[in-house]
Image: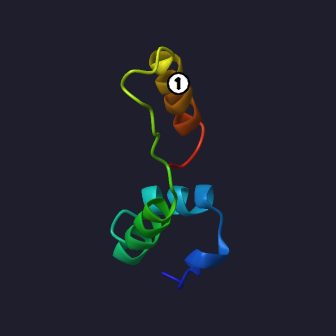
């Protein structure tokens, strides 16, 4: 297998590569490092009357991204 420059490929390409080559631990760690480097959490206050709509919006956003 040829050496892949994980930093040079997009998030989607890295994800696809990792799914295809599940035994490539270096690809796994590169993928996880990218995921951890993103700030993907939501700050919603418990007493916010619009909490449900905000949670749904965050979930929909995350489903469309690599977070």
Q: Residue at x 53, y 35 (%)?
A: 63
Residue 58 spot, x, y in % from top left = 52, 32
In front: 54, or 1? 54
Q: Which residue is drawn at 41% across and 30% down?
A: 45
Q: Which residue is drawn at 46% across and 59% down?
A: 35
Badge 1: few (under 14), some or many (20 or more) residues near its Cα, within 10 Å? some
In front: 58, or 26? 58
Residue 9 spot, x, y in % from top left = 65, 70
Residue 42 spot, x, y in % from top left = 47, 40
Residue for badge 1: 54
- What secondary structure is marked by label 1? helix
In front: 56, or 16? 56
Q: In this view, does 63 lie above or below 8?
A: above
Q: In this view, does 28 lie above or below 41?
A: below
Residue 57 spot, x, y in % from top left = 56, 26
Q: Is residue 62 above or below residue 29?
A: above
Q: In which quarter of the image is residue 18?
A: bottom left
> How many numbered marks does the figure carry?
1
Q: In this view, does 39 lie above or below 46?
A: below
In front: 58, or 51? 51
Q: Residue at x 51, y 55 (%)?
A: 39
């Amino acid at each position: 297998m040829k050496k892949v420059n994980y930093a040079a490929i997009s998030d989607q390409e890295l994800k696809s590569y990792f799914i295809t080559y599940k035994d490539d631990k270096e690809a796994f760690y590169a993928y996880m490092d990218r995921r951890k480097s993103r700030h993907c959490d939501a700050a919603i206050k418990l007493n916010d009357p619009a909490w449900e709509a905000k949670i749904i919006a965050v979930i929909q956003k995350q489903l469309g991204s690599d977070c």
